[in-house]
């Protein structure tokens, strides 16, 4: 497979997600072909960045069918899931694998819905960065953490402190690198709900109901956030801040 490969796994009441990248040995200098290596599989559709007058950069290319070269991996994943279910480790699982460079993919129950949990912080951060791109906010903008800040956190990690002052960039780091719910709560004030929804619809994902505490998404759809970060075509306002999101995504997934 190519330099960039994403595997997303949704498992019953919780989610395991991770990114695997390794060198492609099938082509010169480790470079994968731009288009899919799948046989007899037409391009399903191109998703382009909207809002530009003269150009529409490609965000991602999606293909109709699974790559036959990934069927051995698919069979192996099905075996692992079956084994875990028989041991009552999980009730069910969803896996989606996508080669970033070739657009090859395969999956097991990849359209199954699961609650994203803290992974929802990635599209939230992207919507904050889109606001930065429109020059409506600055990363250096300061905000004081409320003394009444009290947000449920399921695990201990670095967290912002009540009464202290933080920049938006600081909040992004805490939200993503440490999955800090308190920082995320403060970032919500800088999120335009319509822009947040647009992050989804721009990627051909159904508009989320922000009032639904039981919101679900498939591993296949969630992979689109990783694709656009990998391709670097959706957020262009700040290289540094885009790196923050990528590194934070790595921390959330691992």
Image (tube, helix red, strand yellow):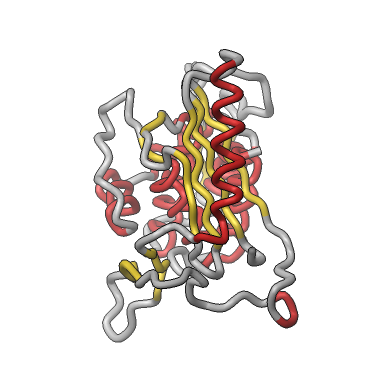
Q: Nearer the viewer, residue 239 or 79?
A: 79
Q: Nearer the viewer, residue 233 or 189?
A: 233
Quick one: quadrant of the N terminus? Answer: bottom right
Percent of width and height locating residue 91: 48, 19
Percent of width and height locating residue 210: 28, 34
- The quadrant in which residue 164 appears is top right
Q: Is residue 209 above or below residue 30?
A: above
The residue at the point 40 percent across, 74 percent down is: 58
Q: Is residue 127 above or below residue 218?
A: below
Which residue, as the protein is rendered here, is positioned at the far bottom?
A: 54
Percent of width and height locating residue 215: 32, 30
Q: What is the tally of numbered marks visible in this picture? A: 0
The residue at the point 60 percent across, 50 percent down is: 72
Left or right for 136, reference 149? left
The residue at the point 29 percent across, 70 percent down is: 50
Q: Nearer the viewer, residue 243 or 99?
A: 99
Q: Nearer the viewer, residue 23 or 135?
A: 23
């Amino acid at each position: 497979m190519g330099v960039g490969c994403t595997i997303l796994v949704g498992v019953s009441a919780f989610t395991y997600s991770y990114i695997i990248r390794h060198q492609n040995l099938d082509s010169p200098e480790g470079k994968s072909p731009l288009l899919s290596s799948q046989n007899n599989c037409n391009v399903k559709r191109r998703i382009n960045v909207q809002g530009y007058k003269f150009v529409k950069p490609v965000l991602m290319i999606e293909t109709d069918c699974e790559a036959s070269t990934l069927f051995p991996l698919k069979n192996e994943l099905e075996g692992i899931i079956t084994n875990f279910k028989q041991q009552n480790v999980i009730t069910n699982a969803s896996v989606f694998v996508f080669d970033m460079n070739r657009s090859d993919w395969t999956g097991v129950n990849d359209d199954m819905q699961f609650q994203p949990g803290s992974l929802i912080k990635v599209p939230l951060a992207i919507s904050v960065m889109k606001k930065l791109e429109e020059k409506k906010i600055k990363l250096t903008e300061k905000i004081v953490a409320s003394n009444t800040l009290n947000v449920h956190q399921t695990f201990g990690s670095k967290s912002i402190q009540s009464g202290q002052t933080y920049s938006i960039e600081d909040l992004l780091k805490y939200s993503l690198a440490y999955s800090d719910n308190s920082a995320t709560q403060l970032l919500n004030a800088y999120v335009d709900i319509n822009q947040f929804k647009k992050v989804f619809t721009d990627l051909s994902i159904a508009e989320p109901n922000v009032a639904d505490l039981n919101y679900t998404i498939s591993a296949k759809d969630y992979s689109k956030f990783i694709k656009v970060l990998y391709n670097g075509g959706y957020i262009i306002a700040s290289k540094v801040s885009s790196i923050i999101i990528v590194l934070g995504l790595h921390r959330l997934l691992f």
